[in-house]
Amino acid sequence: MGEKTQVGAGARTGDGARADGGAQAGGGARDDTAEVIIRLTNLHKSFGELSVLQGVDLTVERGQVVSIIGPSGSGKSTVLRCVNGLEKIDRGVVEIEGVVVAAVGTPGAKPAPKEQIRAVLAKTGMVFQSFNLFPHMTALQNVIEAPMTVKKIPKARARELGMEKLRRVGLDDKADAFPSRLSGGQKQRVAIARALAMEPDFMLFDEPTSALDPELVGEVLDVIKSLAREHMSMMIVSHEMGFTREVSDRVIFVDNQKIVADNPPERFFNSPEHPRVAAFLDKMLN
Ligand SMILES: Nc1ncnc2c1ncn2[C@@H]1O[C@H](COP(=O)(O)OP(=O)(O)OP(=O)(O)O)[C@@H](O)[C@H]1O
Ligand SMILES: [Mg+2]
């Protein structure tokens, strides 16, 4: 598995360019030449005595949208947190853009040098249920904070970039507003703009609309849908089934510490093979 460190290194395209072209258009069609952007192999994770993930294998190709659904406590957030290094894995391999960012108990696989790991993790954007904006900073200041401190982008350029990202989520008119003056939907869109300001190669969304009043959910989902149309690679945990069906190339169901289904949305929702998936969908949709 050691050779995997090299995977993708040569296939990478320049700034923001997409090698996959229309790979996403087929709605789940796999393209054998597509570049794998995230690969989890035999992932195991426990919290003390509690085993949460036991042998999770999962790949996301560049430009794909992969949704994860499953019962509460099944480990959906843990999967995302293992991808971006917020959780240490107990066993298995995590690769991002061909770089091994974590490898435990897997002969032949070893983590890449720290600098390389830092560099690929810096290209991960994550958006949480609770927006986590700095309350003492305006929307724009929230968005430009990381580009200035982490990427050392000069303030004037960071402000331009920040305004561009706020415009991207329809909030350039709220640049000077503090979070306390923003609705939940607006706060979450600022949080998305903040993630985009780091020019991520892929985005992880963990229940981005769960904390919102129902009438504010749509504006956030619309922003995520527009990212999908631009072929942003994404992993999304959401309980919004209509949205999941519309936006995903693949839908993954996690239950009992494992992935029990991984299908294109039509198949996942129309003819779920696994009884647990069928029961879950029945409960969610009826
Ligand atoms: N830091 C932690 N310490 C101890 N237990 C944890 C920790 N994080 C998660 N867990 C436990 O691991 C299990 C999986 O948690 P996780 O948050 O991944 O589930 P989830 O599928 O995202 O659930 P939900 O739909 O409620 O968000 C749960 O039983 C949770 O209580
Ligand atoms: Mg969760």
Image: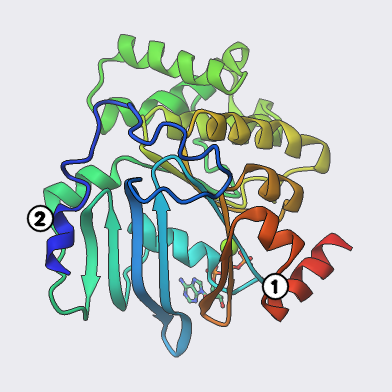
**Residue 247 at what x, y percent from top left?**
63, 42
Specify whether 205 is left or right of 157: right
Residue at 60% x, 73% y is 73
Q: Could you say whether the residue bearing mark 1 is in a helix, strand or loop? A: helix
Examine the image and state in which quarter residue 265 appears: bottom right
Residue 234 bears which disc, if any? Answer: none
User: Viewer-proximal residue, 238 or 197?
Assistant: 238
Q: Earlier in the sequence, mark 1 or mark 2?
A: 2
Residue 18 showing in the rendered view: yes
Residue 136 showing in the rendered view: no
**Residue 222 at what x, y percent from top left?**
67, 31
Specify whether 66 is left or right of 217: left
Name, please, the residue furthest toward the bottom. 49
User: In which of the image's four quarters is ligand 1 placed?
Assistant: bottom right
Residue at 24% x, 27% y is 14
Looking at numbered disc 2 in the image, what kind of residue is underneath it?
Pro
Examine the image and state in which quarter residue 195 appears: top left
Q: CA distance from mark 1 to mark 2?
A: 40 Å
Residue at 51% x, 80% y is 257
Q: Could you say whether the residue bearing mark 2 is in a helix, strand or loop? A: loop
Q: How many numbered tags mark residues here?
A: 2
Looking at numbered disc 1 in the image, what kind of residue is underneath it?
Val
Label 1 crowd bin: few (<14), some (14–19), many (20+), radius 10 Å? many
The residue singled out by tag 2 in the image is 113
Specify whether 121 is left or right of 6: right
The residue singled out by tag 1 in the image is 277
Q: Is residue 149 above or below residue 253?
A: above
**Residue 37 at what x, y percent from top left?**
34, 48
Looking at the rendering, in which quadrant would you find the N terminus?
bottom left
Mark 1 or mark 2, which is nearer to you?
Answer: 1
**Residue 169 at what x, y percent from top left?**
58, 23
